[in-house]
Image (cartoon, grey):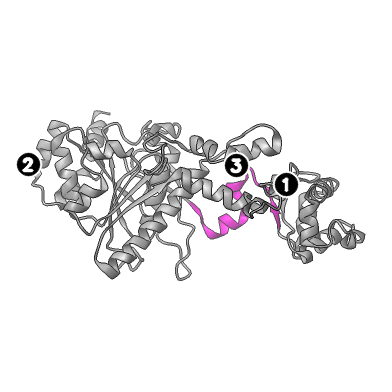
Amino acid sequence: MSDDRALSGIRVLDLTSVVVGPSATLRLADLGAEVIKIEPPGGDVLRTLGGPSPSGTLSGKYLHFNRAKRSVCLDLRRERARRVLDDMLSSCDVFVSNMRVDALTRLGLDGARCLARHPSLIHCTITGFGAAGPYAGRPAYDSVVQGVSGIAGLSLRRDGVPRYVPMVICDHTVGEITAGTICAALFRRLRTGTGSILEIPMFETMAAFVMQEHLGPSSFHPPLGPAGDTRVLDPNNMPVATADGWISISANTDAQAAGFLKAIGRPELIEDERFRSVAARFRNANDWFDLRANALREKPTAHWLAAFAAVDVPAMVCHTLETLPGDEHLQAVGLASTERHVTEGEVTTLRSSLLIDGASPPPGHAAQPLGWDTRDVLGELGIPAAEIDALVEEGAAHDGRARHAALAEAG
């Protein structure tokens, strides 16, 4: 069956690791690109950093960020492996890395040299900090970026203690932006025939999000008030306790606010000067959230969900990590499924959440053991089998299938 997805026929050389880069290339794979993931002999650190696994080499987190990709293992410290990688680039449309720029330069994989050899290549580097600033070249992980971009400091403003969002939100966000930027560069190449050198800096990207959200009245000159959206920063802007759990609710428009007040049995507050308009509720966010925080304690979640649905107020149950996989909507749309993995046994896999022409893209195979596709990919480059054998024997390349077969035979 032909694949008519947007990026069908596009080949991506993926030299990324952990989350930010793999999330970008996962999105490209969902859109139809062939993604070849290059890993060193020890593998992407997420194979173990992401937690335990039956084999000890393929964590659940790695599993979810690296499905639908081919795994090639090369030791780029060796010259012959670097030559193989450059041969691979000649057949690829996109190169993506989140290695530090100086490391790429040492390997001869910086944007200028890659485009000199491959003029139509889309060369994309995800960096911690943009190349033009004084932080250029510094290492960065999600927690570092959450801190320096002001995300953790939002909790300091609200709670008196800075806190990280308890997921790698910067990695996810920048990964998605990276995928979109690569798609735009591919469209530009379609029009012009030329490649591009892309840099996606995490710090600037996330700092812009924070400032877009929170500069608010301080955006004007002179300022009309302090920075910070008082509604979002209010301590009571959180899921609301019910008699038997928690509920997430948002009533932003005047109609929704009136519906909320009716549903909680306080219709007399509809004309209260503190709550009668969007602007009034903004000025009196503390009173509004305090009212909301104390309104739902006496009745169970199911009662409130029905009551708010009846007046068209957005509200949903507040899931936990334990309850989320069993959500009836997620079950109905088949977000998660189970398949048998060659080394890990039964595993849960997640399909793409995208719907294209009413259907989700095929999920592709589960993440592969390290170097599973090395021999096949090198063979597709026209490298003779004897030369591949020599690369493996030298340690410049690693054959994951052969290793798996040897381990299985041994017992």
Q: Which residue is mark 1?
A: 237
Q: Quadrant of residue 77?
A: top left
Around disc 1, counting alpha carbons within 10 Å, would you say few (fewer than 14), some (14 to 19), or many (20 or more)?
Answer: many
Which kind of residue does numbered mark 2 sit on? Ala
Q: Residue 162 falls in which quadrant of the image?
A: top right
Is residue 143 located in the magenta-colored stretch of the structure? Answer: no
Q: Secondary structure at mark 2?
A: helix
Q: Which residues are magenta?
A: 315-336
Q: Residue furthest front?
A: 222
From the image, tell me which residue sits under label 2: 386
Choose between 72 and 175: the one closer to the eye: 175
For marks 1 and 3, give the one nearer the viewer. 1
Is residue 120 found left or right of 245 in the rendered image? Answer: left
User: Few, some or many C-alpha atoms within 10 Å of disc 2 (few <14, some 14-19, many ≥20)?
Assistant: few
How far is mark 2 from mark 3, CA to CA?
50 Å
Q: Secondary structure at mark 1?
A: loop
Q: Name the residue located 47 percent from the left edge and 46 percent from the top edge.
A: 204
For marks 2 and 3 on the same chain, the one whose residue lies earlier in the sequence: 3
In the rendered image, residue 95, in percent from the top left (x then y), is placed at 28, 50
Between the C-alphas of marks 1 and 3, the distance is 21 Å
Inspect the image, locate mark 3, and give the three-letter code of the amino acid beneath it.
Leu
User: Who comes first in sequence, dot 1 or dot 3?
Assistant: 1
Q: Which residue is mark 3?
A: 321
Disc ID at residue 220: none
Residue at image point 25% right, 63% down: 194
